[in-house]
Amino acid sequence: MPSHAPRRSARRDTVLLPLLNRFLILLIVCGTLALALMTFYPEWKKLSHMRQTLQKEHEELDALKNQGSHREQELYLLQHDKDYLELIARDRLDLMKPNETIFRLGPSRNAARK
């Protein structure tokens, strides 16, 4: 009977060793993935933040270009269009022509500045 005992442990080893090998392989794969994640996640997060910042700066640049375009158009009108110049002067400086009455529904610009 003692000869049967070593055979049982040999069977256990043949079943247990492949399971341990699979478990060790799984641990190695999980460790490698964790290492890769710890290495690349901060860089990925930084890249994501940089993309958001770039998007905001592009939007700001577009707004500034639009504002510059409007100011160039207003400058051109001020230099070349006497009717527009008169309109701006009358509105901003509260000027009026002789025998003219101006009705303002909101506060005047001078009152708003004070």
Image (cartoon, rainbow, N blue to C red):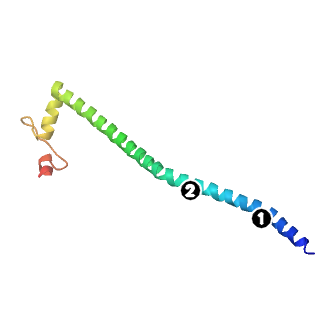
Give the answer, above or below, for where 23 lies relative to 48.
Answer: below
Q: Are marks 2 and 1 in contact (CB under 8 Å)?
A: no
Q: Secondary structure at mark 1?
A: helix
Q: Residue at x 27, y 37 (%)?
A: 67
Give the answer, above or below, for where 39 lies relative to 17.
Answer: above
Camera-nearest residue between 74 and 9: 9
Outermost residue to the front: 2
Quadrant in which residue 34 is drawn: bottom right
Camera-nearest residue between 54 and 20: 20
Q: Position of residue 75 (x, y in %)?
A: 19, 30
Outermost residue to the bottom: 1
Mark 2 nearby-residue class (10 Å; few <14, some 14–19, many ≥20): few
Q: CA distance from mark 2 to mark 1?
A: 27 Å
Residue ID for mark 1: 16
Q: Position of residue 3 (x, y in %)?
A: 91, 71
Q: Tell me the tag on residue 34.
A: 2
Give the answer, above or below, for where 92 lies relative to 11.
Answer: above
Camera-nearest residue between 4 and 25: 4
- The disc labelled 1 sits on which kind of residue? Leu
Outermost residue to the top: 80
